[in-house]
Amino acid sequence: MDKFTQAQRRVFINDIDSFTSKCIAKCLSKHTVEADCSAEKESGLSKSSDTGSQSYKVVGTISDVLEEITPYVLEAYTRPSRENILQKLMECDIIIYNITQHPEQVEEARWAVTALHAEKNNFQQQKTFILISTVMTWACSEPINSDELELPFTDDDFRRRKPHPNFQKHLELEKTVAKLGKMDRALFSTYVVVSGLQYGVGEQVFHLFFKMSWLGQENEIPVFGEGNNIVPTIHVSDLASVVKKIIEHQPKPFYLVAVDYSNNTMEDIVKSIACALGIGKIQRKPFEEAFLKQDLSPIRMCVLGPPAVGKSSVSQQICNHYKLHHIKLNETISETISHLELMVKNTPSDAENEESTSVIEAQELLNIVKDNMEQNGGFLDDQVLVKVLMDKLMTNPCKNQGFVLDGFPKTYDQAKELFHVDEHESEEKASISSYNKKIMPEFVLCLDASDSFLKDRVINLPEKLVQEHKYEQEHFLQILAKYRDKNMEEENVVSYFEEFDINPLLIEITSLNTPDNQLLMHTICERVGKPRNYSQCNQNAQEEASKPIEIVEKAKREQKEVEEARQRSAHWEIFGTPPNVEDLERFIDGYFYNCAMEDSSVEKPSKKPSKKRKNDSATDTDDLTTTEVSVSMLESINKKLEVLSLICEDVKGLKVSIEFFSQQVSDLQRDNAEIHSTLVTVSAELETVKKENKMLKETILDVQSRSMQDNLIFLGISENTSDNPEVEIKKIMTTSLKIPQETVNNISFHRVHRLGARRGNRPRPIITKFEHFKQKIFVKSKGRELKGTSFGMNDQFPREINER
């Protein structure tokens, strides 16, 4: 038992929870070795002492947290830093990097093998690095003898192997691993295992065909393409065994190809799966249908607007919703510089011709970018900036999933330079109305806000963001004014997109419609439509779909309430506060109460009885006095009721006036809406006329340019009243351009004349229209002979082109 423990070796495997790495870990783990021993003993097979004495402690990285450590993994590390990874690698005897499933692991594997090689002098014992690559690094290789395609590849083929374009980095890593392992194999040995397409134990590559056959929902299982291509494959358990044999026996060859002897075509594989699990029928389909069962066309979007309007916030929300790439200027520049530096640094000195050419180009671009930033105070001029952005937009992630271009282009010229047709396009395609369809935005979002709103927003920003975006007061006002000026020009960035019938979505940002408002995002989604990527699971999709509905409805209700309150406020400001019925009732009740109080305060005669009534006449006098008081009170009340009646009439008249003015306001609002609608229609028609006028001008300019393509302008040729321009031109051709006389005699012209009316002693230019375009090109090619003379020669272009 002690001997067995001492023989244990520590093995590191990356992405240990992935399909291939998991199977290799199971094969190498002590648990699996013991199970294998038991199985072999039961079957009566003997086990070699070399194999029986070996067992392994498996550790590695995982992409997500495991609920519990599986029995075949001793330690699992979740997204560790590179410093921590290197520490774990130094503790291991065997390092296995599998790059067949996740392309992002290529860079980590390159770093790992380079870092370990740099630390080899600190090794306690020999370490072995095994890279599991893919046969796709041979995908574009061709055999020497095309008539005998079944002949195996040779060492010469190995040196000339060519990868599929998407696996160029895999090939470069294979060469790096092989080179580093040759330097000191006693301390650090390396192996490259080129694996066929893996299958079995859960499936990976062929999962789609297993699933379709098992479900039985399709009558025919698709075979994409002709299906006659031979697919190099290997069972994932066999691949794990190959890796185990390499660890145990340390073979002399450092490069091994791990494929089985099946020699099956794609049609054979699919048919076998269909027969085993389904009804056995297959159908050939075009390659284009392999991944286009749903709309996966990229969404390309451009977000424009003044500074501090919230472009980055909105862009990030769009990217999160549609799973797009957020293209920011500063990040793209930094990323480009880092990538170029890494490319130059990590390329070996004995690289092949193609690699060395790429390195030279990368170094040249890196120098250009750094020099340009140094000359412009940390910024790039338009030409270099457009080059950097164009390279970014032409990368596969941007071309496949799409992107959101944040705050660029800012001008008409920048847009024209960025989205123009490639230089290799034919002249017919490269017309004035051409653009690069691979990167031209499909949607353009234009945010805008008032200057006061933008200033308030900057004032309320955290100081860190102010410093990061350089939004100090003076600088912010300058860039805001510059933005407004550029957008007032006839040719601005918005007009560029409108030329190609890409109508921008204009959104006004206000305190009610902020960049983080869900209603704003809802408006954008209505224009763009559904996401175009691989669907989420049904539960997640339903949850994501149900969330925005309630939020949007609530936002709509709140916005409607605020808008109604705003309209009421505006209405009251014009006509004053309308009379309230309850207030009027309280006024009338108070009036009657005051009247009653005034009546009760009228001075009444004393009613003190006489101690002695002399006769009955005293009683009659008291009754008369009481009657007079009552009459007086009634008269007072009648007078006040008359006044109150007049007040009520005035209130009724005021109410009628208010109703009249309200009707007038409604009529004015209706008229205003009609005028606004007419104005919008007229504006649209005016824009259409402007576009047509601009296109007509460009067409006329194009016709003029074509009519002048056979023309040359000669400058500085003296003139007199009797000179013959054609004779003077031929004389210049002979004496100054060094064209033989015989050749000059064969040159013919449509016409030769001076340009414009003569003014003063300055000679007028001579316009020469050649009969043959080739003769014009020949004469123009001799223009270098005029260097150092007083003569000049140029192509003739329309005045508008010269002014550009």
Image (cartoon, rainbow, N blue to C red):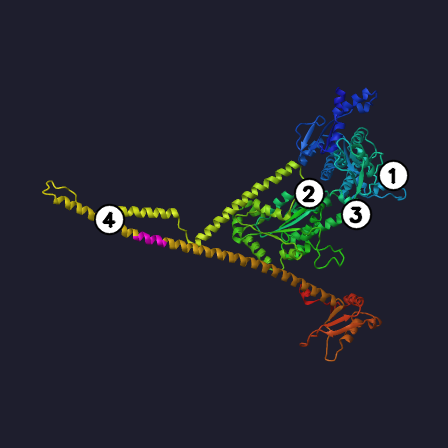
Figure check: 568 above or below 730 = above
Decide: marks 1, 4 in contact (CB < 8 A)? Answer: no
- Residues 51 and 182: in front is 51
Give the Cα separation between the discs numbered 2 and 4.
Answer: 91 Å
Where are the magenta residues, as a range?
642-650
The question of residue 444 being in magenta is answered with no
Indicate the position of residue 596 as horizontal and vertical percent values: 27, 46
How packed mark 1 is, by other alpha carbons closer than 10 Å (few <14, some 14-19, many 20 or more), is few
The answer to which of 33 and 173 lies nearer the viewer is: 33
Name above or below for residue 47 compared with residue 382. above
Query: Which residue matches tag 3?
Result: 354
- Kindly identify which residue carries mark 2: 533
Q: Is residue 643 in the magenta section?
A: yes
Q: Which residue corresponds to mark 1?
A: 152
Residue type marked 2: Asn
Label 1 element class: loop
Dot 2, crowdedness within 10 Å: few (<14), some or many (≥20)?
A: some
Depth check, mark 2 against mark 1: the one in front is 2
Tag 4 or tag 1, which sits nearer the N-term?
A: 1
Look at the image and tell me in which quarter the N terminus lies. Answer: top right
Q: Amino acid at mark 4?
A: Met
- Main SS of the magenta segment? helix
Residue 218 shows up from this direction: yes
**N-terminal label among 1 and 3:** 1
Q: Alpha-carbon distance for marks 1 and 4?
A: 131 Å
Amino acid identity at mark 1:
Pro
What residue sits right under mark 4 in the picture?
A: 633
Measured in 3D between alpha carbons, the distance from the residue under mark 2 to the one under mark 3, in whole angstroms, is 35 Å
